[in-house]
Amino acid sequence: MTREETFNARYAKLANGKKQDAGTDFRDRAKGALWGLVIGDCLGSPIQFSGKESHPWITGMVKCPVFNLPAGYWTDDGSMAMCIMDSFVRKGKYDLKDIGRTFVRWYQDGYLSSVDGRSFDVGNATAVACKEIAFRKSFVNGSEESQGNGSIMRFAPSWFIARKEQGAANIMHEISDLTHCSKRVRETVDKLAKILGEHLDGKRTSEGSAYKTREDVNNSGWTVSTLEAALWSFNTTSNFHDALVAAVNLGGDSDTIGAVCGQIAGSYYGHSAIPRKWLETVKNWQKVDALIDKFLDMVL
């Protein structure tokens, strides 16, 4: 059996996995969106930058040879999402400048990094933006060419803050524009916001993926392709576990494809659908859980 046939057989098996329904209640789905982001990041990082067919098959938390880290360590996706939540919890309100400064604290000092004292796996646009925030006090950074996936990877907390602010949808764009000021990125943010909104209301999204087969999927770091890859993974499976396995095994920018799929799948299936073993493997998972709960207490 060829490698391609082996992968296809595995996906056929995933498609026949146990079907799960929407999460039990709004908070369960909300917590699923936030934890799903972290889980997808941790699952995907060990094979980040690999070709679609040139990596070990990932079915759980494993050591990350890319960054020489134990299983369950999150990368920039999880750190930046935690920075947004941390800012809201500390300030008790939406404060764009504080979110930006918290990004800088992560970038410079490793605040909320899974590796004490340093950030890692930082995208070029994000690195430039953090320097602009730190030294120029610029809270709109990037250009129309800044179409990387660095703002959708951390997106879910922005959705909840915007909801708390009673329809201030521009908040989602402002947080995105901290690092990726691009019309195309904002359009992708809006599409992801629509999907999460449907799921958090308990309705499975009708949004289809531009990709029809696994071979079609572009696994690059382009924001549009990342969302479409995550949607493909969600739409071709029927439970949280299989959606995340499908997503991260696309390789390429696997941690962010996983983080975006984790937001989509988590907001539909809920926190209760995430395998307990995956949750408890995440570094300092109880502290992560406490931050998520504090954030949700304040925004819901």
Image (spheres, rainbow, N blue to C red):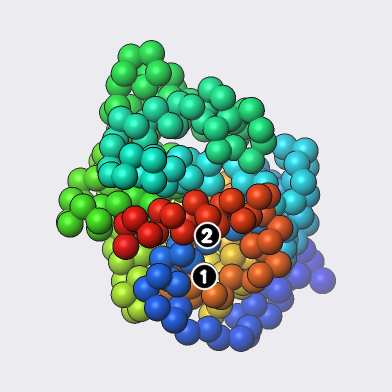
Image location (x, y in percent) of residue 167:
17, 56
Task: Give the residue at x 68% y 80%.
Answer: 13
Work out which residue is located at the far right of the displayed protein and give it. 1
Q: Which amino acid does label 1 sit on?
A: His
Disc 1 from disc 2: Cα separation:
7 Å
Specify which label sits upstream in the sequence, 1 or 2: 2
Q: Can residue 281 be seen in this view?
A: yes
SS under mark 1: helix
Determine the secondary structure under disc 2.
helix
Identify the residue under disc 1.
271
In the rendered image of this protein, does residue 173 appear above or below residue 15? above
Numbered label attached to residue 14: none
* 208 left or right, relative to 139: right
Judging by the rendered image, the residue that carries numbered circle 2 is 35
Q: In which quarter of the image is the N terminus?
A: bottom right
Residue 218 appears in the figure:
no
Check whether the beta carbons of the residues at disc 1 and disc 2 lie within 8 A of each other. yes
Horizontal relation, residue 64 to residue 262: left or right: right
Q: In this view, does 7 lie to the left or right of 15?
A: right
